[in-house]
Image (tube, coloured by chain):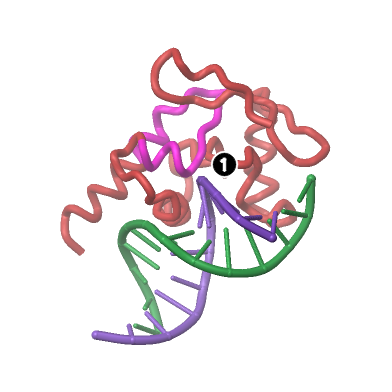
Chain colours: A red, B purple, C green
Amino acid sequence: MTDQQSNRRERIWQVVALIPRGRVSTYGDVARMAGLPGAARQVGAALRILPRGTRIPWHRVLNASGRLSLPADSASGRRQRARLESEGVSFRDNGSVELRRFGWDGSAGSTLG
DNA sequence: GTTATGACGCCGT
DNA sequence: AACGGCGCCATAA
């Protein structure tokens, strides 16, 4: 693996690290913010391999529909939801989240759901 | 080099 | 709204 590729991974982590507590983003947006438009799947792959106990707020990344991409019944899925709720993020009955997306600058104010 | 496989996303039906 | 199909990008087999 070239350093380009590990840089790509680290760039993704770096972007995710910027998502403030209580806010969320999407795989696609993270990819774009990392300068990797269209590489949404790579964001998921990068988050999947995070070491245990990482400080990267991986749980703040949702899919474009505003829902968890992790199976809701899985251990990590429940962990993700619990962490989000502990940050004040609330969910609808359908599983979509009710919070604003973290985006570029102040322009991020759209409601997801 | 080819073919699966995914924490994805968009569009048409 | 739900589903399926296809594109996308990197890895693994």
Residue most extreme to the right: A93
User: Considering only vertical position in the picture, is A61 above or below C10?
Assistant: above
Residue most extreme to the top: A106
In this orientation, does residue A36 appear?
Answer: yes
Percent x, y for residue A62?
A: 57, 41
Query: Which element type, helix, strand or loop, lies under badge 1?
Result: loop
Q: Chain of mark 1?
A: A
User: Dividing the picture into quarters, in which one does residue A85 lie?
Assistant: top right
Q: Residue at x 47, y 52 (%)?
A: A44
Percent x, y for residue A19?
A: 46, 28
Percent x, y for residue A76?
A: 63, 51
User: Considering only vertical position in the picture, is A98 above or below A5?
Assistant: above
In this orientation, does residue A51 appear?
Answer: no
User: Dividing the picture into quarters, in which one does residue A16 lie?
Assistant: top left
User: Dividing the picture into quarters, in which one does residue A49 lie?
Assistant: bottom left
Is A39 or A11 nearer to us in this picture? Answer: A39
Instruction: Work out which quarter of the rendered image holds the N terminus of chain A and state it.
Output: bottom left
Q: How many marks?
A: 1
Q: Which residues are magenta?
A: A13-32
What residue would you read off at disc 1? Answer: A64
B2 horizontally vs A50: left or right: left
Can residue A59 be found in the magenta stretch? no
A77 horizontally vs B3: left or right: right
User: Considering only vertical position in the picture, is B6 above or below A111?
Assistant: below
Q: Residue at x 66, y 50 (%)?
A: A77
Q: Residue at x 45, y 25 (%)?
A: A103
- Amino acid type of the residue tagged 1 in the rendering: Ala
Can residue A15 be found in the magenta stretch? yes
Instruction: Work out which quarter of the rendered image holds the C terminus of chain A and state it.
Output: top right
